[in-house]
Amino acid sequence: MSLNSVSGGSASSSWRGRRQFGGSDNTMYCECEVEGQKIRASIMTSWTDENPGRRFYGCRNWKKKNCGFFDWIDEPINGRAKQVINELKNDNVKLIKVKESSMSAAIDVEAEIAKLGALMEVLKKDSKKMRKKIRFLTTLLFSSWLLFGYFALV
């Protein structure tokens, strides 16, 4: 597999054949310098529709400095593989959205469960009050029958 690079400019499909290795481990360095030393390039993965899953070397400081250092590691992907990877990427995005919405629904369910728990506590208190009232009324009714029976016999 040949490794070509593009140094300077933005990520593109042009190949300029420039390579800077920093030793036997094939470490890449970009043009940026910190304290007089070149910065080691990071290995990143492209997720564009044109190059999905394709790895490349890029400047670690691209957000800050935008030096434009760029070097493909992987060869270009053929049409069918590109199509399959993009379909899988899109399916993954859909699954993430479904997961987020189901998590949101789960949070809603948890909130409803908490509300029902609070309502249940209120109903328990009301139930205790009603039982006391029923006991009182039952006692009152029984007492009235006793009194009625007493006066009926006298």
Image: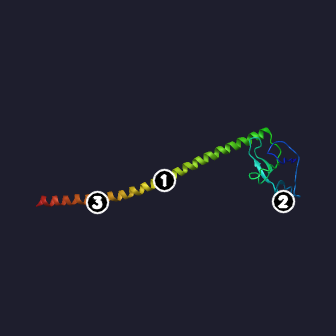
Nearer the observer: mark 1 or 2; the answer is 2
First in sequence: mark 1 vs mark 2:
2
Q: Looking at the image, which residue is at 52% across and 50% down?
A: 108
Q: Is residue 118 above or below residue 102?
A: below
Please name the residue that numbered disc 2 is placed on. 37
Please name the residue that numbered disc 1 is placed on. 113
Amino acid bearing label 2: Gln
How many numbered marks have been drawn onto this rendered protein structure? 3
Instruction: Assess whether mark 2 and mark 1 are in contact (beta carbons under 8 angstroms).
Output: no
Coloration of the structure image: rainbow
Q: Nearer the viewer, residue 96 or 67?
A: 67
- Tell me the quarter of the picture where residue 97 sits: top right
Amino acid bearing label 3: Arg
- Secondary structure at badge 1 equals helix
- Secondary structure at badge 3 equals helix
Q: Looking at the image, which residue is at 51% across and 53% down?
A: 110
Q: Give how far across and how far down residue 71 sits, in percent.
A: 83, 48
Q: Looking at the image, which residue is at 68% across and 42% down?
A: 90
Which circle marks residue 135 in the picture?
3
Amino acid bearing label 1: Ile
Nearer the observer: mark 1 or 3; the answer is 1
Q: Is residue 36 above or below residue 9?
A: below
First in sequence: mark 1 vs mark 3:
1
- Tell me the quarter of the picture where residue 42 sits: bottom right
Q: Nearer the viewer, residue 43 or 70?
A: 70
Q: CA distance from mark 3 to mark 2?
A: 89 Å
Q: Give how far across and how far down residue 94 sits, in percent.
A: 64, 43
